[in-house]
Image (cartoon, helix red, strand yellow):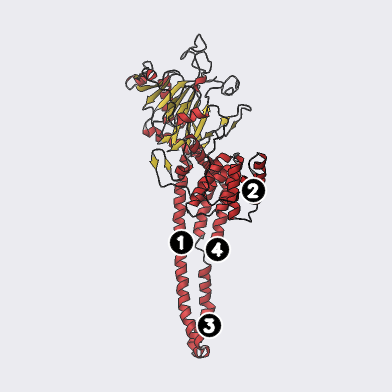
Amino acid sequence: MRKFLSLVFWTLLCCCWTAQADIFTSISQMTDLIYTEKELVQSLKEYIKAEESKLAAVKSWANKLDVLTRVSTSDPEAYLAHPVNAYKLMKRLNTEWSELESLVLQDPSDGFISNMSVHRQYFPDEEDEKGAAKALMRLQDTYKLDSESFSKGKLPGMHSNAFLTVDDCFDMGKTAYNDADYYHAVLWMQQSLRQVDAGEEAVVSKADVLDYLSYSVYQMGDLPRAIELTRRLVAIDPSHQRAGGNLRYFERLLTKQLLELNQARQPASEEPIQLGTYARPKDHLPERETYEALCRGEGVKMTVARRSRLFCRYQDGNRNPRLLLKPMKEEDEWDSPRIVRYLEALSHDEIEKIKELAKPRLARATVRDPKTGVLTTANYRVSKSAWLEGEEDPVIERVNQRIQDITGLTVETAELLQVANYGVGGQYEPHYDFSRKDEPDAFKRLGTGNRVATFLNYMTDVEAGGATVFPDFGAAIWPRKGTAVFWYNLFKSGEGDYRTRHAACPVLVGSKWVMSNKWIHERGQEFRRPCGLTEVD
């Protein structure tokens, strides 16, 4: 058993060295791990069965020999006086004990370890675990989920048996702490403390939770509470390596802030620790509050007057022959800038084929660094994507043709179809699809001009979250399987429409697949969408 545990330890350790990164950014790739884990569980059960069979055989040997030795040791000379007994003793020690030794040394874990070795190269690594933890915190922030409800699996509109243990909450807090994200470290260490105080069993000690929590609270600027928490830590573990020094340091700081000296040195209270509430720090995104409110369905500026200007119609692409007999169902989503949705833009079979083509080549989605122009990954875009060419399969060619028929724009100069699958908390924070004046070379290598329009296909429904939102004018477009939305990024003059800054909200529940973004470029549209006479035409 010791050999088996050692092998498992080293196998799991190797997993961290050889794993593929960014698995957490795609639900599609994570589903493969579900089946991998099921296979490993089956392999583990087979090992247990073999180990139990082996132990049963050894136990049978031990019982038989126990009876025999009790008889033989009662009067050894009398026992050996019989030649048969003397022969069988020689036989047992020469042959049968060797067979028993071989049985004991037999290792049923070999099959399990071999199976682990095959799969470990596809296991998540430390960065995946860290990324998934940050994704939960992102969901917590965006959808205003409190840590206690989150830890019990209570999400808007659903309740499940998924829950976070004391140790899970502690690990979440530690992930934030190691990133100097003390706001989230406090939230999750507090939750870990709540569950410890409620009597939940854990591997982590209360002293460890208080150690991280007290320092995180100090970093959030709450010295009185940091002192109280540190006193509790000292009361639990007087020999703690850092607690005594931290307590003296915190008290000196508090004294300097002109608080009462005797208040700073009160003995540790036996009352339950009061958990604090802190403001979420500001970050790089100026429209953070507006963006996240729209993701929650709040602040949408769909007035009665605006709604009265929205209609639905059949659209035949200006009498396009392919749409005359079966025109597209077109719905207005927004009036200015105009955003329309097309129903039945993709069939179920087309969606499944596109996902089948894309899945093997999904790779972490990238963004273009505005300073260097180099494509790189970023925390504000969490998904995996694949690019599909028209020649790969008739369904891709058919979709390209359909987009051209619907929009009236040529796709000859458009980018390839990009298929994206969002993972845990998958998102794309507010961004522009077109290049701005400070990015003149963004699409220079393509030689097709700027991105004039975006055609976005939704390939799945999303149970919660995942909306496409426009913070500038307060619109939220919700995913509906088989539909597509379309808008122009540029005015007819060629100037960028800065109102079209948009975002893909974090996916709260579900798996979001989009055929994002058939980006249509300027070249070739000269006679299909002629230039306007003013900047905002």
Disc on the earlier residue, 3 or 2: 3
Q: Position of residue 409 (x, y in %)?
A: 45, 19
Q: Mark 4 belongs to which amino acid?
A: Arg
- Asked if labels 2 and 4 touch by Cβ distance under 8 angstroms, the answer is no
Distance from label 1 to label 3 (Cα)?
34 Å
Horizontal side of residue 316 vs 454, given as left or right: left
Tag in front: 4 or 2: 2
Disc on the earlier residue, 1 or 3: 1
Tag in front: 1 or 3: 1
Classify 435 as above or below 363: above
Neighbourhood count class around disc 2 (C-alpha, 10 Å): few under 14, some 14–19, many 20 upward: many
Residue 90: give its label.
3
Q: Mark 1 belongs to which amino acid?
A: Ile
Q: Nearer the viewer, residue 190 or 3?
A: 190
Classify 106 as above or below 124: below
Which residue does the numbered mark 2 point to in the structure image?
247
Residue 279: give its label.
none
Tag in front: 3 or 2: 2
